[in-house]
Image (spheres, rainbow, N blue to C red):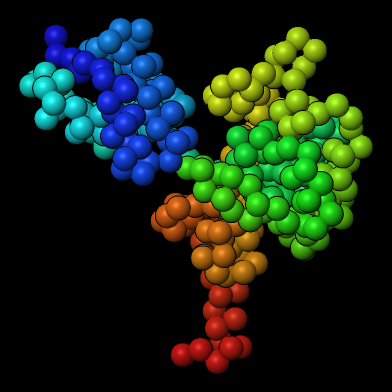
């Protein structure tokens, strides 16, 4: 059976010299170890089965394996008949990207005010600031204090890139209540990171691993209990669409979301008829041709 023998130390050194971000290097190495299943070789059948069944992080795992094979094949570590995964997704079709309607968003925010202050503040960071779950749980007390007092803070996001986060009273983005929700976190003692506030009495919300953080986030969002099937990333996606609708500036939306590629940002916008009308009316009033 064809296989790919692992040299993770050498591969990590190669990525370091190539300037790959530390977080990406760690993720790729972890994905390769998972595909190997405790062995020192990734077997073709096991890799194909794992990538087909995997629902979270499958795209990154395929990228990790393709990148490793490209580096390792010239070094004689890859069997000649080992076939790296194709660029397209091997598993079930992705669920359609979802944006919350204005009604659903309003109901969600209203219901979020009824939960405990730590969860309320956490949810606010998702829907009013557009944070990823990993970014939100990693924020420390000093960052929250800066965000609450100055309305802005720099966070380290995906790929170890820094980006600005704003929290201001802007119609359609954040309200005075949202600002108060974040300030309310500072009234709680005994925590260093947001993650500390989300750990239950039995540790069931542990954030020791990124995928557990995502699962925990899903439980928190579902726990608001308003009958809306909102995933955590739906809140971030809705935030991006609202920023684009208000500004009409895809570059500004890219900065707000912290995307490396503007092509990714485009997928966070709906392109509704209302957005088209706003753009056309704005162009007409501005005297554009």
Point out residue 123 in the picture as x, y percentages from the top left corner.
74, 38
Seen at 61% across and 88% down, the residue is 285
From this view, report whether residue 253 is shown above or below residue 140.
below
Point out residue 139 in the picture as x, y percentages from the top left corner.
70, 38
Furthest residue in direction right, as rendered: 187
Horizontally, is 147 left or right of 154 in the view? Answer: right
From this view, report whether residue 47 is shown above or below residue 26.
above
Q: Is residue 272 visible?
A: no
- Between 202 and 98, the residue placed more toward the observer is 202
- Between 236 and 135, the residue placed more toward the observer is 135
Seen at 14% across and 9% down, the residue is 1
Q: Quadrant of residue 63?
A: top left
Seen at 85% across and 38% down, the residue is 185
Point out residue 228 in the picture as x, y percentages from the top left corner.
69, 35
Horizontally, is 33 left or right of 205 in the view? Answer: left
Q: Quadrant of residue 280?
A: bottom right
Seen at 24% across and 12% down, the residue is 41
From this view, report whether residue 117 is shown above or below residue 286.
above
Number of marks in the image?
0
């Amino acid at each position: 059976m064809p296989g790919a023998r692992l040299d993770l130390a050498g591969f990590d050194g190669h990525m370091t010299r190539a300037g790959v971000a530390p977080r990406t290097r760690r993720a790729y190495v972890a994905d390769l170890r998972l595909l190997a299943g405790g062995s020192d070789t990734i077997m073709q059948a096991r890799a194909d089965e794992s990538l087909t069944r995997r629902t979270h992080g499958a795209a990154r795992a395929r990228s990790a394996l393709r990148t490793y094979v490209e580096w390792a094949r010239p070094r004689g570590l890859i069997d000649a008949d080992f076939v790296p995964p194709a660029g397209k997704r091997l598993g079930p079709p992705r669920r359609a990207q979802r944006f919350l309607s204005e009604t659903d968003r309003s109901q969600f925010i209203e219901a979020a005010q009824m939960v405990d202050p730590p969860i309320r503040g956490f949810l606010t960071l998702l829907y009013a600031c557009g944070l990823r779950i990993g970014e939100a749980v990693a924020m420390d007390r000093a960052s929250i204090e800066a965000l609450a007092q100055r309305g802005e803070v720099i966070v380290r996001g995906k790929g170890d890139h820094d980006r600005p986060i704003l929290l201001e009273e802007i119609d359609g983005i954040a309200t005075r209540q949202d600002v108060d929700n974040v300030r309310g976190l500072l009234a709680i003692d005994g925590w260093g990171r947001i993650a500390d506030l989300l750990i239950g009495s039995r540790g069931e919300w542990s954030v020791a691993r990124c995928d557990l953080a995502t699962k925990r986030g899903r439980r928190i969002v579902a726990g608001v209990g308003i009958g809306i099937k909102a995933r955590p990333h739906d809140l971030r996606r809705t935030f991006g669409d609202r920023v684009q609708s208000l500004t009409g500036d895809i570059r500004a939306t890219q900065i707000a979301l912290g995307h490396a590629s503007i092509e990714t940002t485009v997928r966070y916008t709906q392109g509704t008829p209302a957005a088209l009308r706003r753009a056309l009316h704005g162009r007409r009033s501005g005297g554009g041709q």
